Amino acid sequence: MGKDYLYPPYSIAKKLLPWTFYAVLSLAIFRLYLYPLHLYFHSASDQLPHTKSLIITSSSTSSLSLTSSSLAQEKEGADHDDETPCDYTIGKWVHDKMGPLYNGTTCGTIKEGQNCITHGRPDLGYLYWRWKPRLCKLPRFDPNAFLDFLRNKHLAFVGDSMARNQLESLLCMLSTVSVPNLVYRDGEDNKFRRWHFDAHNVTVSVYWSPFLVKGVEKSKTGPDHNKLYVDHVDERWAADLDQIDMIVLSVGHWFLHPAVYLEGDSVLGCHYCPGLNQTEIGFYDVLRKALKTTLKTITERRGSSGDFIDVFLTTFSPSHFEGEWDKAGACPKTTPYKEGEKLLEGMDAEMRHIEVEEVELAKENAKQFKGLRLEALDVTKLSLMRPDGHPGPYMYPNPFANGVQEHVQNDCVHWCLPGPIDTWNQILLEVIRKWQHQSRREE
């Protein structure tokens, strides 16, 4: 007999079984060593529901948490879908060969002080940048789409000179496809104006209201300080709320001026008021009170009526003075800051924080009303990174025609048109587009 017959088949299997077990165990350990993350995420997904990080247009925090899916979108440059709002505050300025939609000669509604090209600004590189959000795309402004979305509606810009600056930017971009007809003007320096786009029946207005609440501005013949009533909205614009379908608020810079503040019949205190025998309380809390009064008034008057209204608050726009305002070179930069080169801090950060926070609180209050949408148009960070976009000395025509003078007035607060402020209206359009898509899905 051969040796094979000395060992039955089950004996051979018995001897091989331990070796087979050890081989399989070794392969399993080897695979676990090579692919630990894959196995971890697989098991985690079996236990937890799939979630996406929510990135909102306005956020009161500066941190950003990214999931693996959002990192993949950043790498591929993919568009976010309608379910995931884009955080337009996170991004960078990149070169743009296309340049602006309009220039200083093609738009007839530019305020004289912001017409930098016509006034002889020699460097035009500031025109060729576009804002690129990190996690989504910001399309080039489409004036036809904007007018279609606003068909048969009234859009009002309410606030200080930054509201007017943003309004004039929008008018210039819309005028590339449709001529705005000025149908109303009133007040010193045309502080109250209204235009009509006949083809779409769109009305666009501007209301001068530098505090949004009731205020008495300082004057050459009166007190050298402002007086604010923080618990009463400015009725010059609020009285027209029933005629407005969309409102863009802008406020901030005028709160830096000397002022006395009142609530009811009581004086709260003042800001920078030596000699008035009042308590110095600064302006941060007063700004917050003014915003609460404004947003509460809009919510109550329009929310209770059942009429639809969209409300935006454009956040604080930083200035870029370097040195004295009346000397040459007050805002000398000719290119944007790079990411991390300029931090959002101090007063700029605090103003923006208060504005974003009050909008978020107003959103909660507005949930009881149907048809009332609010959003912070959060442009503080992207504006901070554009020190090159201000008129500077070119707020006046050819300021150096006779050489550099001892006193040169500079504007390092407002924005050249065209210029970085056009991006604010790009973002405005994208939020409106998002809201329109959401409304269609709900119908």
Image (cartoon, helix red, strand yellow):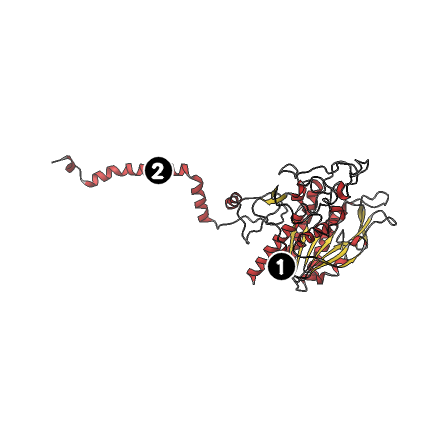
Q: Are marks 2 and 1 in contact (CB under 8 Å)?
A: no
Foreground residue among 18 and 86: 86
Amino acid type at mark 1: Asp
Q: Is residue 420 above or below residue 192?
A: above
Q: Say whether residue 120 is left or right of residue 81.
A: right
- The residue under label 2 is 27
The percent coordinates of residue 360 (x first, y second) are 65, 52
Q: Residue furthest left?
A: 1
Q: Is residue 278 above or below residue 183?
A: above
The answer to whether 439 appears left or right of 201 in the picture is left
Label 2 sits on a secondary structure element that is: helix
Q: Quadrant of the C terminus?
A: bottom right
Residue corresponding to mark 1: 148
* Nearest to the observer: residue 238 or residue 390: 390
Q: Where's residue 438, x and y in %?
A: 57, 58
Q: Which of the two discs, 2 and 1, sits closer to the camera?
A: 1
x, y percentage for residue 184? 76, 59
Q: Quadrant of residue 402?
A: top right
Residue at screen point 71% across, 62% down: 243
Question: Observer-nearest residue: 145 or 264?
Answer: 145
Q: Tell me if residue 367 comes above or below residue 341 in the rendering.
A: below
Q: Between 349 and 127, which is closer to the camera in this rendering? A: 127
Q: Is residue 181 left or right of residue 45?
A: right
Q: How crowded is the residue under tag 2: few (<14 C-alpha within 10 Å), some, or many (20+)?
A: few
Please give the name of the residue rendered at 66% of the width and 54% of the height, measured from the top-left corner. Answer: 174
